[in-house]
């Protein structure tokens, strides 16, 4: 047998035929073809029946994905972010990168999904079918030596799958390529470990020179993972397409871009009449123009306007953003229809903004910004109280080494004026500020009627002061969860405290922040939340330091816009508003209206004295 194998085989033409084992060895040792991810995908990728368009992959169908996929081949790129909507092929671009890395580079890959269940689904329903339909990958796949969470290949490549909720699966073997899908759905922390993205990237430490990571997701809010990646990128790109009429390059935008007939009112009518309007020539662009526009499109740096291919330096971290208007499977009418169907329902509108426009959601009706605060300045200087004000309240935020305070005047219709605010460092100084006399425009002097003080820090000292100053000071504590009412009453049950048995007010800060935000957005006047003339920027910034974002369990919550921002004065105004509620500010009467009514009543009484029968009116028309 051995002698037969050593004999040189020849074909009929006398040409030498190498043994089969040599063929296999040569096939293994053959250097990979010099080809890009997009070209490799066009050559080898077959889409299964579960895809929108089964059959051979064609990058020209979604031409905006070409540059994104080919960043894998760019030696100047280390990290890529893709802010995307649904229905643009983002996940398939990720899959194509994985297929290329396995076939062309025989390297290790980690795909991270939000949960382990989705990771298993990705392996079973996405990657494995892709391998079976790709003859090049199928030939290399060691199916017997693979399992659901780990696919191994005969050329030494591997693909691991992990859920972002599983810290153990994120930190083990060294990995060259990390690919993250739907990162905004990841938990903030992976068990007791770091955030899932950072934890997974630790596996790339041994690949310092040529590691690669790709993160894609529809955005949720500005503090979501994908939007942070977008903002942190060295270069950021959007896809520009030429107008078919004038050639002007522009990005597809929903606002002022998608149009419909003026008479179209319903979602169906708008869908039927929708079109896109060029921002330059104002000509109508229809769906039949879209594919040619996409093929002629280019990715441009949003800061410099440079086209991606021309940029050779400073591209270590880059990011791309695109919306659903670009999708070949979405018509202009579909976008108009979805907006009309969603615009009156906050949760549906949020989905439209996130999943269609690929923009972070902002609760604009309860959004505060410092310019709005400074626009609420009145003509009154600090420490002067308007004559229309009837009560004075204060809010005190207690820190470990100081106190922040805000004093606010209130009138009818919950109209309020900021009188003063500041920071102090001693109990005695705080007490002096709360008990000082403030002057009204008329010259009358008044004092704070009621102050509410946070008891979360320096609790014993807070309780002692409240026990001694019950006539003007009440302790409060923020609620850890939303409540049905703005506040509820509890009792201090510390037996050894001077404040034992004293009322403690539990406050739903979110409801008061809703009120403050709504009234700040009113023009100065009745019902507005105003500040004194010359109000400082620091106060304004702190008052708008939080924003309302979706909660994990539904609904919305207030939280700091950034992790290091101060919100002390916002808390002070919440507490001052609670104090106003405790004094029944909602039931204050309009003093000017009352005075006018009293004056009219006095004049009428004088008239009756002069003519006592004047109040008798006899309708005589019915007697005729």
Image (spheres, rainbow, N blue to C red):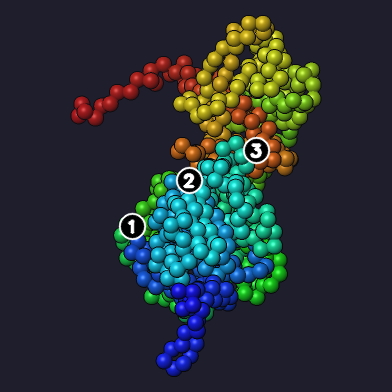
Mark 1 surroundings: few (<14), some (14-19) or many (≥20) residues within 10 A: some
Determine contact: label 1, label 2, CB under 8 Å. Answer: no
Q: Quadrant of the C terminus?
A: top left
Residue lying farthest to the bottom in this orientation: 13
Circle 2 crowding by C-alpha within 10 Å: few under 14, some 14–19, many from 20: some
For the point 68% across and 40% down, the residue is 565
Helix, strand or loop status at disc 2? loop
Q: Tell me where residue 243 appears, x and y as whole percent.
A: 49, 76
User: Residue shown at 66%/69% (left/top)?
Assistant: 75
Place of residue 157 in the rendered image (x, y in percent of width and height, measured from the top left): 54, 62
As drawn, is 134 to the left or to the right of 514?
left
Left or right, 575 with reference to 405: left
Q: Which residue is mark 3?
A: 543
Q: CA distance from mark 1 to mark 3?
A: 39 Å
Q: Residues within 10 Å of mark 3 (few under 14, many from 20)?
A: many
The residue labelled by disc 1 is: 267
Residue located at (39% from left, 51% from top) = 342
Callout 1: SS:
helix
Sequence-wise first label, 1 or 3: 1
Name the residue nearer the viewer: 481 or 600. Answer: 481
- Residue position marked by numbered label 2 in the rendering: 115
Q: Is residue 190 or residue 526 the one in the foreground?
A: 190
Vertical side of 260 occupied by 166: above or below? above
Lower sequence index among marks 1 and 2: 2
For the residues labelled 2 and 3, the Cα–Cα distance comes to 37 Å
Measured as percent of width and height from the top left, residue 509 is found at: 56, 30
Residue sitting nearer the eye, 303 or 277: 303
Q: CA distance from mark 1 to mark 2?
A: 36 Å
Place of residue 455 in the rendered image (x, y in percent of width and height, measured from the top left):
65, 20
Q: Residue at x 49, y 82 (%)?
A: 7
Q: Is residue 328 visible?
A: no
Total marks placed: 3
């Amino acid at each position: 047998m051995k002698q037969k194998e050593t004999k040189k085989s020849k074909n009929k033409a006398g040409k030498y035929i190498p043994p089969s084992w040599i063929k296999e060895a040569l096939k293994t040792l053959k250097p990979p073809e010099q080809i890009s991810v997009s070209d490799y995908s066009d050559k080898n990728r077959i889409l299964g029946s579960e895809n929108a368009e089964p059959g051979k992959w064609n990058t020209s169908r979604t031409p905006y994905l070409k540059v994104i996929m080919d960043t894998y081949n760019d030696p100047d790129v280390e990290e890529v972010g893709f802010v995307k909507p649904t229905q643009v092929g983002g996940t398939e671009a990720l899959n194509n990168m994985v297929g290329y890395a396995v076939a062309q580079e025989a390297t290790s890959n980690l795909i991270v999904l939000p949960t382990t269940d989705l990771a298993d689904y990705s392996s079973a329903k996405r990657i494995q079918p892709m391998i079976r339909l790709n003859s090049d990958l199928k030939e290399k796949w060691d199916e017997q030596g693979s399992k659901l969470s780990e696919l191994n290949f005969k050329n030494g490549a591997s693909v691991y799958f992990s859920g972002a909720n599983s810290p153990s699966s994120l930190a083990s073997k060294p990995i060259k390529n990390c690919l993250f899908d739907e990162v905004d759905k990841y938990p903030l922390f992976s068990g007791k470990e770091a955030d899932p993205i950072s934890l997974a990237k630790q596996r790339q430490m041994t690949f310092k020179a040529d590691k690669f990571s790709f993160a894609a997701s529809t955005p949720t809010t500005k503090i979501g993972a994908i939007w942070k990646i977008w903002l942190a990128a060295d270069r950021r790109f959007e896809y520009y397409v030429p107008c078919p009429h004038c050639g002007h390059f522009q990005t597809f935008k929903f606002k002022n871009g998608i149009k419909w007939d003026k008479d179209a009112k319903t979602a169906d009518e708008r869908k039927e009449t929708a079109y896109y309007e060029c921002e330059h020539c104002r000509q109508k662009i229809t769906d039949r123009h879209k594919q040619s526009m996409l093929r002629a499109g280019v990715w441009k740096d949003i800061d410099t306007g440079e086209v991606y291919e021309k940029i050779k330096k400073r591209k270590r971290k880059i990011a791309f953003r695109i919306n659903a208007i670009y999708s070949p499977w979405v018509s202009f009418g579909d976008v108009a229809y979805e907006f009309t169907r969603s615009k009156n329902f906050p949760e549906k509108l949020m989905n439209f903004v996130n999943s269609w426009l690929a923009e972070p959601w902002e609760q604009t009706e309860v959004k505060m910004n410092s310019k709005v605060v400074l626009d609420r300045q009145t003509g009154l200087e600090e420490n002067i109280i308007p004559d229309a004000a009837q009560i004075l309240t204060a809010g005190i935020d207690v820190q470990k080494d100081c106190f922040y305070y805000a004093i606010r005047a209130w009138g009818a219709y919950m109209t309020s004026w900021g009188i003063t605010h500041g920071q102090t460092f001693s109990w005695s100084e705080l007490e002096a500020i709360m008990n000082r006399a403030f002057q009204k425009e008329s010259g009358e002097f008044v004092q704070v009627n009621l102050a509410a003080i946070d008891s979360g820090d320096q609790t014993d000292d807070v309780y002692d002061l409240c026990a001694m100053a019950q006539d003007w000071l009440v302790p409060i504590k923020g609620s850890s969860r939303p409540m049905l009412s703005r506040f509820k009453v509890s009792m201090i049950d510390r037996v050894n405290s001077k404040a034992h048995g004293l009322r403690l007010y539990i406050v739903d800060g979110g409801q008061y922040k809703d009120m403050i935000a709504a009234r700040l957005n009113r023009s100065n006047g009745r019902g507005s939340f105003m500040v004194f003339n010359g109000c400082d920027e620091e106060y304004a910034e702190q008052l708008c330091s939080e924003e309302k974002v979706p909660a994990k369990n539904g609904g919305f919550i207030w939280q700091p816009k950034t992790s290091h921002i101060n919100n002390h004065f916002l808390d002070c105004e919440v507490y001052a508003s609670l104090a106003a509620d405790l004094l029944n500010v909602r039931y204050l009467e309009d003093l000017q209206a009352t005075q006018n009514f009293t004056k009219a009543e006095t004049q009428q009484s004088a008239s009756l004295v002069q003519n006592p029968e004047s109040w008798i009116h006899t309708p005589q028309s019915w007697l005729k």
